């Protein structure tokens, strides 16, 4: 019964065995018979997939992440990516040589797709580095027939010339936009305190009507959580995105100074589910990062997946956050450094420590969402001293996953119970174990 979980659904139960690819609605009699050995698991003939494990052996990066700068033209009131010192830009030589290294790694593995992500700050704020990396990939494409794949996470606040470059060369854009102008300008003003909405909306309009896959990333606060369905409708009608990603505000020193609070977990779940129903009318997907029920994973982020994140000064880590953030918490994310003309110096012991971080806490192992959320952000978990069922992250993740599972079974009325936050659902959300072996009627 290892890896089999049960969730209450009115007078029935959702039986969820993610490593077997099985999710079904059953009654109490079936669960009793199955535990007693008198019934077979639906889909029992399917072979059990191996649980994702810790990576071993040589480095096999999934993608190259280039933090071209931590600088940004915006002064978002809740931002936790602000550097403690003046932001520097990545030298073009470092950007180009990082790409060279990544391409050779992929060719050595007989793979032709080279995945490069640009991050910041605002990655286009250091446009010369981004330009150099893209052009270097294009050179390799002509020479070796590789297929570059570029993704940019951006504020959308850049020049028309840079916008045209993005339209010509980038495949995926993750654009931060918190809502209509009155919301956007409150939370995401320029550094001088001016309005950002006009320029960002102009960018979103151009991207939404292009070949690019546009993902709108919306940070949700306690003030905006009730407006999530309206925000989703405005996004879909105005910009034609491919995906809308909703993320609850993560408390930071800056957000606390500004007086902003994350949404209550029950409010976020209700807002997300209703926003999803709204977006579906437009054929647009919504995402809450930890609740991806169609994926089996043991890492929520690049940590433990061998992806390389290169800082402007050449330091290499497994995390997009500022190095000072995870260093203060004692997390071993630094795995080496790039030096122009000398390539990558990798620390094998540090790589091993980072890989081992994918081992889940015991509390996660009893949760039905363990292979979907994979324990969430290591930094947030360390800040809180570990997760508990009463933690807002666990509550909203478990409930969104449950809502999605019920809808995947066509059980819209039962999914509505999650949306309405009934007493039964609230009790279950904080249950300590979902494992079938710990179940009793």
Image (spheres, grey):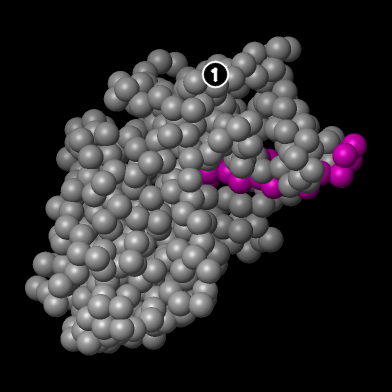
Given residues 63 and 45, the one toward you in this image is 45
Residue placed at 26% from the left, 83% from the top?
A: 33
Q: What is the x, y in percent for residue 79?
A: 35, 36
Q: Which residues are magenta?
A: 142-162
Location of residue 150 with respect to 324 vertically, above or below: below
For the point 71% across and 42% down, which residue is it? 114
Query: In the orientation shown, which residue stands out farthest toward the right?
Result: 143
Give yes or no for residue 397 being in the magenta stretch.
no
Which one is nearer the viewer's eye here, 165 or 219?
219
Q: Position of residue 69 (x, y in %)?
A: 53, 26
Q: Quadrant of residue 29?
A: bottom left
Using the image, determine if residue 124 lies above or below residue 13: above
Q: Circle 1 — which element?
A: loop
**Left or right of 266, for residue 74:** right
Residue marked by disc 1: 347
Question: Which residue is at the front of the view, 247 or 167?
Answer: 247
Position of residue 341 relative to residue 398, above or below, is above
Q: How many marks?
A: 1
Quadrant showing the C terminus: bottom left
Q: Nearer the viewer, residue 297 or 377?
A: 297
Label 1: how many residues lie within 10 Å, few (<14), some (14-19) or many (20+)?
few
**In this rendering, does residue 129 appear at all?**
yes
Relative image position of residue 210 (x, y in whole percent): 66, 61
């Amino acid at each position: 019964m290892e890896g089999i979980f049960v969730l209450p659904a009115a007078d029935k139960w959702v039986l969820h065995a993610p490593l077997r690819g099985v999710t079904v609605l059953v009654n109490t009699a079936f669960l009793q018979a199955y535990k007693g050995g008198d019934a077979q698991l639906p889909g029992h003939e399917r072979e059990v997939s191996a649980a994702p494990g810790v990576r071993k052996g040589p480095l096999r990066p999934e993608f190259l992440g280039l933090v071209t700068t931590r600088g940004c033209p915006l002064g978002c009131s809740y931002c936790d990516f602000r550097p403690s010192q003046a932001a520097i830009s990545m030298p073009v030589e470092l950007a180009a040589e990082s790409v060279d290294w990544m391409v050779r790694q992929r060719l050595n593995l007989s793979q032709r797709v080279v995945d490069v992500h640009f991050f910041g700050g605002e990655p286009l704020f250091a446009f010369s580095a981004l330009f150099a990396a893209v052009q270097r990939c294009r050179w390799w494409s002509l020479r070796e027939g590789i297929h570059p794949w570029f993704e940019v996470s951006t504020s959308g606040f850049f020049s028309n010339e840079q916008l045209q470059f993005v339209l010509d060369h980038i495949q995926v854009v993750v654009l931060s936009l918190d809502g209509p102008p009155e919301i956007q300008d409150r939370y995401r003003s320029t550094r001088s305190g001016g309005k950002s909405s006009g320029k960002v909306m102009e960018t979103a309009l151009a991207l939404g009507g292009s070949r690019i896959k546009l993902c709108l990333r919306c940070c949700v606060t306690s003030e905006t959580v009730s407006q999530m369905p309206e925000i989703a409708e405005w996004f879909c009608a105005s910009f034609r995105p491919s995906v809308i990603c909703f993320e609850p505000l993560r408390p930071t020193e800056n957000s606390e100074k500004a007086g902003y609070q994350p949404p209550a977990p029950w409010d976020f779940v209700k807002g997300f589910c209703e926003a999803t129903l709204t977006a579906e009318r437009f054929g647009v997907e919504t995402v809450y990062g930890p609740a991806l029920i169609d994926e089996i994973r043991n890492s929520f982020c690049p940590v433990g997946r061998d992806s390389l994140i290169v800082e402007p000064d050449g330091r290499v880590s497994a995390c997009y956050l500022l190095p000072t953030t995870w260093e203060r918490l004692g997390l071993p994310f630094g795995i080496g450094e790039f030096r122009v003309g000398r390539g990558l110096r990798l620390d094998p012991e540090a790589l091993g420590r980072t890989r081992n971080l994918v081992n889940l806490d015991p509390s996660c192992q009893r949760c039905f969402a363990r292979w979907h959320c994979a324990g969430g952000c290591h930094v947030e978990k360390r800040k809180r001293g570990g997760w508990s069922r009463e933690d807002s992250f666990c509550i909203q993740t478990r409930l969104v996953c449950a809502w999605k599972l019920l809808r995947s079974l066509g059980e819209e009325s039962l999914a509505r119970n999650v949306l309405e936050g009934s007493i039964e659902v609230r009790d279950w959300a904080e249950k300590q174990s979902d494992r079938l072996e710990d179940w009793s009627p």
